[in-house]
Image (cartoon, grey):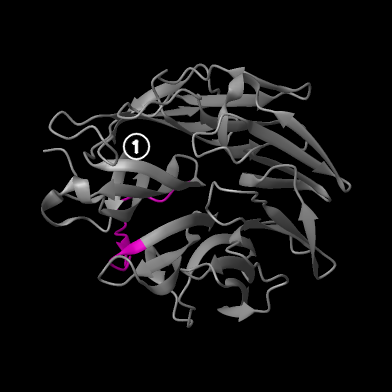
């Protein structure tokens, strides 16, 4: 049973924080990772790990490297991993949670040439994966890499795509990923779905030339991939979302029943999903980052029958980042919002909490900024 908003919640999110990933280990326990910028918003000030405990999100006391901490995998209350990288990507970091403290541990592989650790997924205490992202450049040959953890050893594994956008272990020696198959440019139209089993890869082009960014696997042979339609033009709204389903016979595009205009669909499992529709604010220049989320929908039970509109009280949120379910009917999400003057592209991150049928933001902004009148 979810906790009620009647119990006050404290969120000590540092100013100028960037949130990369959230995870909840129970309705009352969770973690987030990110980084904190210096006042100039260009120089990194510190890494960030926050723990949710006793109705409060608070930064940990452990000393952290000056790095973006971008991935977290918590296996048990006493065991977890965090990946990170320096601002200039000259060094990657691996942290381990042991005996109630986060400590830096030796990295199994130090990326070079601008490559860096880009996230971690653990299947169990004995098996997991780290992605090594290539330098963010669309020139020349770039190549992602996975590190596979077994028997206390991390082993490099080549992958069938130059870039990995998401990856999910589903069993021993069994992993799915989505990425793209070329380095032609940021507006790619060649997403690939990769399946690794017992040392072998099977790669499948995404049907309909969908641009895939996230996976939600239910088992080794069934799951969903989400992304966008390939059409995109400068000055236009982002294209509508695409959802693919693997039913055991292959990947197929499906209609979820959400608003067809929704540009972001977050699948938490096959019976729990959120959809968000963006618009151009009437008074704003139509260029990014001024496209803001205007409506939200929630589906539970079955994706094609039970979508419900949910009041969206915010006016300036441009993107939902990491989103997790704490309990049935209760969710946490990292939200990105724009700050005037919009032409400067200034931004902030905050936490959103959905509970008792309503969205709430943390920490609350002065004067109700970002909320509808």
Quarter residue 366 falls in: bottom left
Residue 7 sits inside the magenta stretch: yes
Q: Position of residue 322 (x, y in %)?
A: 47, 48
Residue beneath label 1, please? Answer: 357
Residue span colored magenta: 1-17
- Residue at the image position 23 percent from the left and 32 percent from the top: 286
Is residue 100 in view from this perspective?
A: no
Position of 328 relative to 15 (above/below) = above
Q: Quadrant of the C terminus?
A: top left
Taken as a whole, is the magenta stretch helix, strand or loop?
loop
Position of 4 relative to 232 (above/below) = below
Question: Callout 1: helix, strand or loop?
Answer: loop
Along the viewing direction, whichever of 41 and 171 lies nearer the viewer: 41
- Residue at the image position 47 percent from the left and 59 percent from the top: 28
Residue 225 sits inside the magenta stretch: no
Q: Is residue 151 left or right of residue 55?
A: right
Q: Position of residue 35 (x, y in %)?
A: 42, 67
Q: Is residue 180 left or right of residue 194?
A: left
Q: Outermost residue, right direction?
A: 198
Q: Position of residue 239 (x, y in %)?
A: 42, 25
Along the viewing direction, whichever of 258 and 285 lies nearer the viewer: 285
- Residue at the image position 32 percent from the left and 55 percent from the top: 350
Is residue 44 in view from this perspective?
A: yes
Position of 30 relative to 256 (above/below) = below
Along the viewing direction, whichever of 9 and 220 lies nearer the viewer: 220
């Amino acid at each position: 049973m979810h906790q009620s908003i009647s119990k006050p919640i404290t969120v000590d999110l540092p100013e100028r924080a960037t949130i990369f990933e959230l995870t909840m280990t129970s309705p009352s326990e969770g973690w987030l990772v990110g980084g904190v910028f210096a006042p100039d918003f260009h120089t990194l000030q510190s890494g960030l790990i926050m723990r949710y405990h006793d109705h409060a999100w608070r930064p940990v006391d452990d000393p952290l490297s000056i790095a973006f901490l971008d991935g977290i995998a918590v296996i048990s209350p006493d065991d977890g991993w965090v990946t990170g990288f320096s601002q200039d990507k000259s060094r990657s970091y691996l942290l381990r949670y042991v005996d109630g403290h986060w400590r830096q541990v030796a990295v199994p592989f130090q990326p070079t040439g601008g490559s860096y650790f880009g996230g971690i997924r653990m299947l169990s205490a004995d098996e997991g994966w780290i992605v090594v992202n290539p330098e963010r450049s669309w020139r020349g040959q770039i190549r992602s890499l996975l590190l596979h953890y077994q028997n206390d050893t991390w082993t490099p594994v080549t992958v069938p795509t130059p870039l990995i956008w998401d990856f999910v272990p589903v069993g021993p020696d069994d992993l799915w990923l989505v990425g793209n198959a070329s380095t032609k440019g940021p507006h790619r139209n060649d997403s690939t779905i990769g399946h690794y089993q017992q040392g072998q890869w099977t790669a499948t082009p995404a049907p309909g030339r969908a641009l895939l960014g996230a996976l939600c696997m239910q088992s080794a042979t069934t799951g969903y991939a989400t992304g966008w339609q390939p059409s995109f033009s400068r000055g236009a709204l982002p294209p509508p979302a695409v959802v693919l389903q693997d039913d055991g016979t292959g990947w197929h595009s499906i209609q979820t029943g959400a608003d067809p205009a929704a540009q972001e669909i977050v699948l938490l499992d096959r019976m729990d999903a959120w959809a968000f529709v963006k618009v151009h604010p009437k008074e704003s220049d139509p260029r990014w980052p001024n496209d803001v989320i205007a409506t939200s929908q929630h589906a539970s039970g079955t994706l094609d029958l039970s979508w419900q509109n949910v009041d969206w009280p915010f006016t300036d949120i441009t993107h939902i980042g990491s989103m997790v379910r704490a309990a049935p009917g209760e969710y946490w999400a990292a939200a990105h919002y724009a700050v005037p003057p919009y032409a400067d592209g200034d931004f902030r991150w905050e936490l959103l909490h959905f509970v008792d049928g309503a969205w709430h933001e943390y920490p609350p902004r002065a004067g109700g900024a970002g909320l509808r009148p």
